[in-house]
Image (cartoon, rainbow, N blue to C red):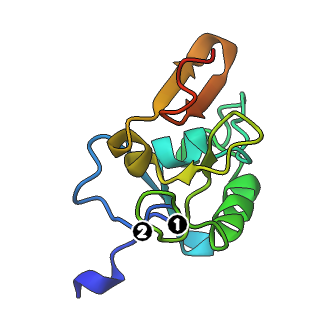
Amino acid sequence: GPSTRPKCGFCHVGEEENEARGKLHIFNAKKAAAHYKCMLFSSGTVQLTTTSRAEFGDFDIKTVLQEIKRGKRMKCTLCSQPGATIGCEIKACVKTYHYHCGVQDKAKYIENMSRGIYKLYCKNHSGND
């Protein structure tokens, strides 16, 4: 039934409501899945420049699986559920989010593809660039 459909290892939602989160990439060998944006802003994920692994949104699957594992211990500032690997860039700040929770909590996402910069500043620190 529907319970077997893959869900994102970070935000725990499947494909049904992910328009903002980007494509849900599924890695069958490891029974893992993750939305593009959930991976993009997680601090420990590594994007590859090679196209040989493009089937997982150009992310190094090893780093994604490590982040999903790390996320199991990280509770979201907004919803208190685990998987919240997107922390505020200000090192002293303890706020950490799921991608969509950061959006809801008015955090500021910095996305600079040409420089490979993908950061979150919580609403308290969004004035500090």
In the image, 43: left or right of 20?
right
- Residue at position x 38%, y 43% in the image: 105
Q: Is residue 22 above or below residue 109?
A: below
Label 2 residue SS: loop
In the image, 17: left or right of 37?
left
Image quadrant in which you'd find residue 128: top right
- Residue at position x 33%, y 44% in the image: 104
In the image, 35: left or right of 67?
left
Q: Amino acid at mark 1?
A: Gly
Q: Nearer the viewer, residue 129 or 61?
A: 129
Q: Quadrant of the N terminus?
A: bottom left
Q: Which mark is residue 85?
A: none
Crowding around mark 1 (Cα neighbors within 10 Å: few <14, some 14 to 19, many 20+) is many
Q: Is residue 115 above or below residue 11?
A: above
Crowding around mark 2 (Cα neighbors within 10 Å: few <14, some 14 to 19, many 20+) is some
Count the marks.
2
Residue denoted by label 1:
9
Residue 125 lies, in percent from the top left, at 58, 28
